[in-house]
Amino acid sequence: MRARNRYRSSGAFGLVGVAAGLALWLVAAAACAPGPPGPSWSDVDRLIAERYSGVPQMTTELLAETLDAGRRPVVLLDAREAEEYAVSHLAGAHHAQTVEEAMRILRNSPPDALVVAYCSVGVRSSALAARLRERGITEVHNLQGSLFAWANEGRPVYRGRTRVAEVHPFDAWWGTLLQAARPGESAP
């Protein structure tokens, strides 16, 4: 009888041990699982349309055509943080996080220049464009999809005058919109 009780006791502890092990495995698996998915481009477009409805949006295709045609001066304003700008930016872009910095740049620009603001996905640059419009700059557009869309399409980005492949992801959540391997580039 005594041996039988020991067997039952160790069986119960064995079951508790298995349950505890399973619980630890589930906790570890949940901790290692990817977080919630990042935003979609339709989420970004909807957010910008709701918050900055008065800001005209320019497609990456139209900007590329405008720059290639060279018929009109274009002033590119990069509204990202300095660390992001240092990694890469559009050719000839000016770093301007604030409306004051942008106004200083625009004072030294041709009066007929088309002004295009961009950031990572278009939220910060739409805010900058809205503030510039409040200051009377009417020919200002936000680059729809901004640098992420530009790079995702395989268009060139630069660090200074050197063409590079790297784009700052801003953070892990927004960075999900940046393709790891872009057209015309080899994957890292």
Image (tube, helix red, strand yellow):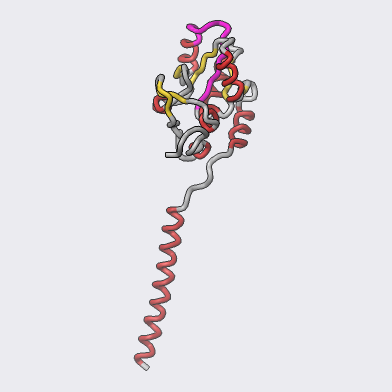
Q: Residue furthest bottom?
A: 1
Q: Residue at x 43, y 54 (%)?
A: 31
Examine the structure image and report whether residue 107 is included in the region drawn in magenta. Answer: yes
Q: Position of residue 150 (x, y in %)?
A: 53, 28
| Residue 92 position in % (x across, y down) | 46, 16
Whether 9 is among the magenta residues is: no
Specify start and end residues of the magenta stretch as a single range. 106-119
Residue 123 appears in the picture as rendered:
no
Q: Is residue 89 above or below residue 105?
A: below
What residue lies at 52% left-to-right and 23% top-to-bottom?
118
Residue 162 is situated, as x and y percent measured from the top left of the image, at 40, 22
Q: Which quadrant of the rendered structure holds the C terminus? A: top left
Q: Which residue shows up at 50% across the image and 18% down it?
A: 77
- Quarter location, residue 139: top right
Residue 121 is situated, as x and y percent measured from the top left of the image, at 53, 30
The relative height of residue 123 versus residue 109 in the rendered view (above or below) is below
Q: Quadrant of the N terminus?
A: bottom left
